[in-house]
Amino acid sequence: MNGITLTDTVYTHAKVGWHYHENAYFTFILEGKILEGNKKETYHCTSGDLLFHNWQDAHYNIKPAGYTRGFHIEFDPLWFDALQINTAAIQGSMKLLHPQLKMSMYQVFKEVKLEEANCGLTVAMLLTGLFSDMERTQERFSKKIPLWVYKIREVLNDAPTENWTLFNLAAYLDIHPVHLSRGFSKYFNCTLGEYLRKIKLGKALSMLTDRTCSLTTIALRSGFSDQSHFIRSFKDVLYIKPAEYRKLLLK
């Protein structure tokens, strides 16, 4: 697709030894589990996890028993040049934690599966925005930042269904609520409410491939108060109903 290659892949090998890819690419886990390691880190990935690898970055994969499926996007270097995307800020391998980046990838997957006439244009726009968000996130986290920023990212990703308030979250981080309210958007490029909502949506999306879970169950397990709230939030971000997105995932 004009300099990018997209694949919906089922992992069949229990292990793939050290190797590298000639081009930069994303790995987005749709179902199952995979362990991926490089010379610096090891990532234990489950459904909804997103990795980015720059070109010729050596790594290996180990797949536990069971079904594992991933969505991959590979980029020809000329694609970056044509769109004037700065790759200096996205060197090496990394696990991407910001929920906005994951939402962008779920949007790309949706557009590819819908196979509409303007799919190529929409995908290119989404990916360009994704790299822009990546760069901004890396800029924020590459500078000296307070410890609470790392702590809040960890606790919100680990416990998105917790009934957080501004005051109990500030108390947990040992900072003033006003400082948290003002400082959050500086480092995360969104409000605290937006961040939490997208984490919950990511959790819900990761469960849509489980045919045994009803939408009501998924909504409640993801931290939404009810199914109607879940559907509204889902449509606001992905412009499609959860039931319709589930059909695309199970295609």
Image (spheres, rainbow, N blue to C red):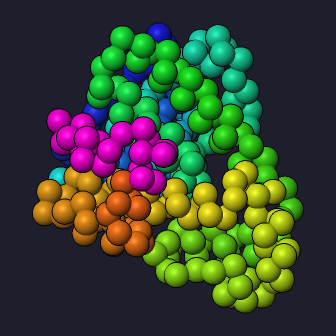
* Depth check, front residue: 66 or 175: 175
> Is residue 237 located in the magenta-colored stretch of the structure?
yes
Which secondary structure dominates the residues rendered in magenta? helix
From this viewpoint, is residue 4 visible? yes
Judge from the rendering whether residue 105 lies leftward or rightward of residue 249; answer left or right.
Answer: right
Relative to 148, residue 48 above or below: above
Q: Residue most toward the front?
A: 228
**Which quadrant is the N terminus positioned in?**
top left
- Measured as percent of width and height from the top left, residue 59 is found at 46, 46
The residue at 43%/32% (across/down) is 108
Q: Residue at x 56, y 64 (%)?
A: 196
Q: Quadrant of residue 126?
A: top right
Percent across and percent down for residue 241 are 32, 44
Say which quarter of the image contains residue 177: bottom right
Extreme-left residue of the structure = 212
User: 208 or 82: nearer the eye?
Assistant: 208
Q: Position of residue 115 (x, y in %)?
A: 30, 20
Residue at 35% of width from left, 69% of height from top? 226
Indicate yes or no whether the magenta region holds residue 246: yes
- On the rendered structure, is 71 left or right of 89? left
**Left or right for 250, reference 245:** left
**Rendered position, 105 above or below 82:** below
Quarter where residue 217 is shown:
bottom left
Residue 22 visible: no
Q: Residue, x 26% and y 54% (percent of image)?
A: 208
The reply, left or right, for residue 157 in relation to residue 87 is: left
Closer-to-camera residue (37/247): 247
Span colored in magenta: 232-251
Give above or below for 89 relative to 64: above
